[in-house]
Amino acid sequence: MFGTYFGYELVKQGKRDLRDLGALALIILVLGGIHALKVPMLAAIALPLMAMITFCIPIVILVEAAIDYWQELYGERGYFTMTLPIKGHTIFAVKILRAIIAGIYSTAVAILLGLFDAWAFATNRGVEVSTIITTVVDSLTDAGTLPLSLAILLAFIWLVCMVITMSAAMTIGAQARWNHLGAGAAFIAIIAAYIANQLVISLASFFIPMNINMTTREFRLDSIFMMTVGPGASGLGEGSWMPLGLFIVLPLWTLFMALWGARTINRKTSLR
């Protein structure tokens, strides 16, 4: 049943995402044309708007996924969803997996459109596109394989963490005890989950004694707190430090929220 429901969600939501991504891409292309043609009154704001829309593409897609999930739990489609012969945790897992996939492909689209933005920026400044590409490639090469790999892995973990914790928060917010709040319950739960996420990230970054210097590749079993504030603090020195504790704490926190959300949708969601 998981495969059937997942396939249905992938096709249904994928069509909507494709339509939205196409519309956003078209807007960016039109703005690029306005900039290239130097349309009076509009050309000056075309580049900033292109950059803003490109940056917001994954956010728009993920917000739509969140709205769809809430409607499946509590909105007009909620009663129909809860009559399906599917376990609550299956609905929870399918929605999360589809949202993660949507986050990945919307980010890929944003990166591709970002290249178009870079071309428009280059033509505006009279800079060769090849110069910008060379600068970016050189910067990535100088950064090294390890920092880039860790950064990409951390970005993926962060995406998974945000999708799961926000989905769990909405699931918890759909409990019968908070029916009187309506959609406000989801909003409050999301804000609370976001604050909790930031708190977990901050504590893990500052206090877990595992850090690697992205410049010198030095590994230290000291926390940022001990290096900067604690007794005998030696300072951070040169380069920037990546807290490796995030790679442990974030998955554990996400697992806790996932189990809480799955238990809630099975037993306490208001429409069940």
Image (cartoon, rainbow, N blue to C red):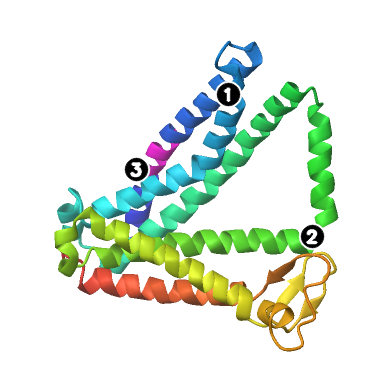
State the residue position of label 2: 145
Q: Which mark is residue 12?
A: 3
Q: CA distance from mark 2 to mark 1?
A: 35 Å
Q: Amino acid at mark 2?
A: Thr
Estimate the spatial distance between the alpha carbons at disc 1 and disc 3, rounded to whole Å.
Answer: 33 Å
The answer to whether residue 84 is above or below residue 217 is above
Which quadrant of the view contains residue 143? Answer: bottom right
Q: Position of residue 67 (x, y in %)?
A: 32, 49
Of residue 237 and residue 101, the one placed in the foreground of this image is: 237
> Which secondary structure class fits the magenta region best?
helix
Query: Was residue 15 drawn as part of the magenta stretch in this picture?
Result: yes
Q: Which residue is mark 1?
A: 46
Residue at disc 2, secondary structure: helix
- First-in-chain label (2 vs 1): 1
Above or below 195: residue 231:
below
Q: In the rendered image, which quarter is residue 50 located in?
A: top right
Task: Give the residues drawn in magenta, as a range.
Answer: 11-18
For the residue labelled by badge 1, is the local secondary structure a helix, a strand or a loop?
helix
Mark 1 nearby-residue class (10 Å; few <14, some 14–19, many ≥20): many
| Residue 127 is covered by the magenta coloring | no
Secondary structure found at label 3: helix
Q: Is residue 182 above or below residue 237?
A: above
Q: Amino acid at mark 1?
A: Ala
Out of 7 and 34, give the one closest to the viewer.
34
